[in-house]
Amino acid sequence: QQPVQSPQAVILREGEDAVINCSSSKALYSVHWYRQKHGEAPIFLMILLKGGEQKGHDKISASFNEKKQQSSLYLTASQLSYSGTYFCGTVINNNDMRFGAGTRLTVKP
Amino acid sequence: GAGVSQSPSNKVTEKGKDVELRCDPISGHTALYWYRQSLGQGLEFLIYFQGNSAPDKSGLPSDRFSAERTGGSVSTLTIQRTQQEDSAVYLCASSFSSGSYNSPLHFGNGTRLTVT
């Protein structure tokens, strides 16, 4: 039931863009995205519900294709503060949340 | 406090001993989750509570692991006869809604367990 994330790691220069993908083998109620910095707890970024919606948070946005059971997180004009590990969380049965293995993003000056 | 509180923040124990990890969720949050994160790894689902009941215990690694929640609030994760492979950060999260699909999870800072 665990979603699959790709890539495992990304290294960017400040100002560059990145895309992180998340896919599931099961039908999804929703997809969550979280960011975790080293030694800290994960923090919530956004939730995407069924309906193919897109959401944005500053220069971070995401899409959710429920038919393909996939979500993508888009980071544009990346900043140093974007560094961290990004996790997608998928909700299959309206109850528990399963997370992908994470994508480690490093933004360099 | 306003956030999810976990205690202790660090626990060092000898192999074979039992440990109890505590989670105090945000007031009013009905859903509570336990995850395990080994060094540099992802978030491994352990168990989920809705109120005091646990609809999904499938993530508990073995029968040495158990969890309970009382009063729809505080939860305790107990690991019996600890093994070195149990060493990890144990994260607790809570959410407001009865269904997690539309409600963000709020994480505590975790308990770092080291089994020597």
Image (cartoon, coloured by chain):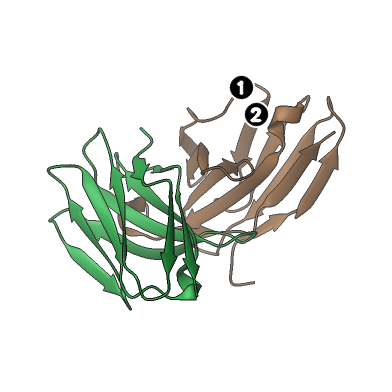
Chain colours: A green, B brown
Q: Position of residue B1 (x, y in %)?
A: 65, 72
- For the point 21% across and 38% down, which residue is it? A27
Q: Position of residue A71 (x, y in %)?
A: 25, 51
- For the point 66% across and 46% down, which residue is it? B89
Identify which residue, B30 or B4, lies in the foreground. Answer: B4
Identify which residue, B77 or A15, lies in the foreground. Answer: A15
Up-down relation of residue B56 to residue A55 (above or below): above
Q: Which residue is mark 2?
A: B65
Image mark 1: chain: B
- For the point 51% across and 49% down, which residue is it? B32
Q: Is A52 positioned to the left or the right of B48 in the image? A: left
Q: Which residue is mark 1?
A: B62
The amino acid on which the numbered mark 1 sits, given as a three-letter code, is: Ser
Q: Position of residue A34 (x, y in %)?
A: 43, 59
Q: Are marks 1 and 2 in contact (CB under 8 Å)?
A: yes
Image mark 2: chain: B
Up-down relation of residue B103 to residue A65 (above or below): below
Quadrant of the snapshot with the N terminus of chain A: top left
The amino acid on which the numbered mark 2 sits, given as a three-letter code, is: Phe
The crowd level at tag 1 (other Cα within 10 Å; few <14, some 14-19, many 20+) is few
Q: Which quadrant of the structure image shows residue A47? A: bottom left
Identify which residue, A3 or B81, lies in the foreground. Answer: A3
Q: Is A35 positioned to the left or the right of B25 in the image? A: left
Q: Position of residue B38 (x, y in %)?
A: 62, 40
Q: Secondary structure at mark 1?
A: loop
Q: Is B28 positioned to the left or the right of A70 in the image? A: right
Q: Secondary structure at mark 2?
A: strand
- For the point 38% across and 36% down, which residue is it? A2
Dot label at residue A38: none
Q: Is A1 positioned to the left or the right of B74 in the image? A: left
